[in-house]
Amino acid sequence: MVDMDKKEQILHYHRIDGLSQREIARRVGVSRKTVKRYITEYETLAQADPEDGINMCLASEPKYPTRKIERTRLTEPVCAEIEYWLSENAKRRLREQWGYLSYLRRLLEEEVTQRREKSKITRIHRADFPQMKYLEELQREELPLEGQMLLPEVETLEFIKEGRSIVMYGNPDTGKTHIAIALGIKACLEGYLVFFTSVPRLLTHIREAKTEKTLRNLEIKFERYDLVICDELGYVGFDKESAEMLFNHLSLRTGKKSTIITTNLPFTRWEEVLKDKVLCSALVDRLCHKSYLVNMTGTSYRIKETKKYISNK
């Protein structure tokens, strides 16, 4: 005759750990025939009366925690759901609508969904976008022609899988930053790691890392992002050291990972900012390789809005 303690172990190893009957028999120290008898008894009870099956199993769970259970981290909402599941009301609900395994499956599906949603929020937060802008908010008919042609091709995010870059150049306030942020947010929602920065801010980070002797760590981190967005190239001039630092960092990603550059200057004027003709040519060569080059020159959104406002007065 098997005592109650061993019976509880058998049910626990079968229901919670999913062990084979052979392994359960070895751990508990009984025959496989005994293990099979108690498992069959439990399954018969569970089918005939779900409440009896639940009660039979719950008796074993608190006494034999396993490493698998200890390592499981459940969020507070799921813990609250489990407490409800153990209540009398939940037992009745299970008996009337689902089996306990179906209910547990639903609980775990909800937990997975919550974690996925939380990871999306975390990726967007870590990307450090200055503001939230979405592709759906773009007035596409107001974009410059090349911007309108670009969107259908890049909003699928295939350019990230292919490691291609995008360089958008043109006068201010024509939608360059909006497109860049919107693509970055969509990439975060689809599981990509994204980093947004302005070029002056990136150079500040590089200088600080160099001073603190953590430059290599910054380079490794910069290289691992699936998409890096460098905004506002050309608004602030660089000295030769800054130009070299920018060149070295962007070169880490060339041909491997995607980078989006927004600038108010055409390539022919980059030398005005970089102050080094050879370095400028090398940087342009790397950025243009397998990249989308998009002329975003057009009328400023603010100017259009001002004209509309004046005409409506």
Image (cartoon, rainbow, N blue to C red):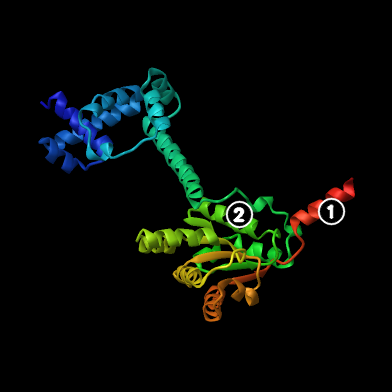
Compared to residue 126, the image places residue 27 above or below, namely above
131 or 183, nearer to the observer: 131
Name the one closer to the observer, 258 or 205: 205
- Which quarter of the image is occupied by the N terminus? top left
Give the percent coordinates (x, y) of residue 210. 39, 63
Picture coordinates of residue 76 (x, y %)?
A: 40, 31
Query: Three-letter amino acid code at disc 2?
Result: Ala
Residue picked out by circle 2: 182
Residue found farthest to the front: 239
Residue furthest out toward the bottom:
278
Label 1 sits on residue? 307
The residue carrying pointer 2 sits among few (fewer than 14), some (14 to 19) or many (20 or more) residues within 10 Å by Cα, namely many
Identity of the residue drawn at 45% across and 27% down: 97
Q: Nearer the viewer, residue 295 or 52?
A: 295
Question: Identity of the amino acid at label 1?
Answer: Lys
Q: Splitting the image into 4 quarters, where does residue 60 fall?
A: top left
